[in-house]
Amino acid sequence: MRINVHFARVGLIGALFFTCVLAAPLAHAVDELHDAIAITPTSKHYSVKAGDHVTDSLTIVNPGDTIINFKVYARPFFVKSGTYETVFSQESDYADGYRWLTLPLTTYSVAPKQKVSVPFDMYVSKGARSGGHYAAIFAETQAPQVEGQTGVANNKSVGMLMYINVEGSTKTAGAFTGIDMPWYQPAAPLKSVPHLENTGETDFSAKVTFAVMDIAGDVKYQTNGDYWMLPHTTRDITFTWDKSPWFGLYKVRVSTTVLDKTNVTESYIIIAPRWLVFVACLVIILGVIDVVRRKRTTTKHKSH
Amino acid sequence: MKQIVKSSLIAGTSLAALVGLVVAPTFQASALTNTSPTTITATVAPALSIVSGATVAFTMTPATFGAVAESNNSNVVTVSTNNYTGYNLKLKDSDATLTLTGTHGSIPVSTDPFATPALLTTNHWGYAIAGAPFSAVYSSQTDVTTSTLKYAGILATDVTLKTTAVTANADTTTVWYAAKIDTATATGTDYSDTVTYTATTNP
């Protein structure tokens, strides 16, 4: 208990330190900046029943040193292509959750270094299909309208992604489908791209671990994370070892766990520039030629 | 450069402040409700912040009647997030009017898309970020008659400027805006438009 109280104090003091001591003078130094906006959380997952009413909120923080005015609104959310580029402008069978969202207030003002809670209601349709539905709520600053203003002004918008799973009979399916991990990579950083797919009707989280070891088996770099897979999508997750050297031989292990099924791929990878490979090949060829030439010379001497 | 450093400072501080604000209550709640003397739990909530420079202004003055003048200026957008899958930054016009509109006229937006930006045609404006498919490097220009810098026209729908794959601590993106006019564009000091930068974490 004493430890917890200690950490609580540390946490509070840390927060006060960051907000009052560090943020203020730095923010004042940036006098040409209009405004800043921050959001937390950046995503939320809901498991609901058709017809449910959910009340929740997100938090908008003004880390800048001027008052910000912002508006909030809901939009469809889904992804496109294997890169999982987010799309907020197209409604689809899955990107329809925004229809269930209502925002009691749509405009807010926040003083510098303050935060505001933005409440919202989710009225899940009674006839909602079971499975995944996706939406996003955005908070967008409103650039002040200055008479005679010239040039390009800007608003800033931050969004919270919403993953809404309507309970009921639904298909959950997905798999690891392959990996791009060439054994020869001509330039750093060392790269590996596992491919995953979701063939079901709702989202799930896939755990992926990327580890790089040297020849002795010592881990040089490792990272892991949970990656959300949306229904009927494929995802290419790019891992790079940013501090990989320009030359070396490494063992790479990529482990993916999709719906409790784990797949481990291991491979040795050579990082070497093409010119080095060319020089090495040239040396080998010259060496072979030299050996053959010496052999022929020796044979001739013997026959004489 | 100075602006980039300053933007980085405020963005980094913003994220630190945000995490501080989020983490502190978690510690406090743990202290009040946890009865185990050895269990310490802390939750770091995902957060994301965006900071950008003020209005980007540029002035064009054709040297002679009929001459062209192209000028540009930049805006640094700074994003921070503790989300380990990174973030996505998009750009669009804030409304359906894509021109730089002034009291005495307007400057139409470039018709070249993000995928294939091109040199600005006279009496148009556009945006750019350094690197393919745009020009490799951008620098400040004022009243140049010829430029080799490529620009695209802004749309009313989102265009992705950047996608990252790891946490970001004051990650900056410099967006350049430019206009090229001749004396067919009426004089004015209030040609303006508003764009929207949208940042979200990746799934």
Image (cartoon, grey):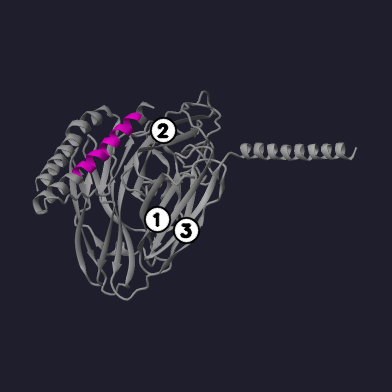
Look at the image and give the residue range highlighted in magenta. B5-21
Residue at x-position 46% and y-position 44%: A216
Q: CA distance from mark 1 to mark 3?
A: 11 Å
Q: Nearer the viewer, mark 2 or mark 3?
A: 3
> Could you tell me which secondary element the residue under label 1 belongs to?
strand
Q: Nearer the viewer, residue A5 or B109?
A: A5
Q: Which residue is mark 3?
A: A195
Residue at x-position 29% and y-position 69%: A166
Q: Are marks 1 and 3 in contact (CB under 8 Å)?
A: no
Q: Nearer the viewer, residue A241 or B134?
A: A241
Inspect the image, locate mark 1, and give the three-letter code of the amino acid beneath it. Answer: Val
Chain ID at mark 1: A
Chain ID at mark 3: A
Q: Which residue is mark 1?
A: A208
Question: On screen, B38 above or below A277?
Answer: below
| Residue A276 makes an appearance in the image | yes
Crowding around mark 3 (Cα neighbors within 10 Å: few <14, some 14 to 19, many 20+) is: some
Q: Nearer the viewer, residue A285 or B71?
A: A285
Q: CA distance from mark 2 to mark 3?
A: 38 Å
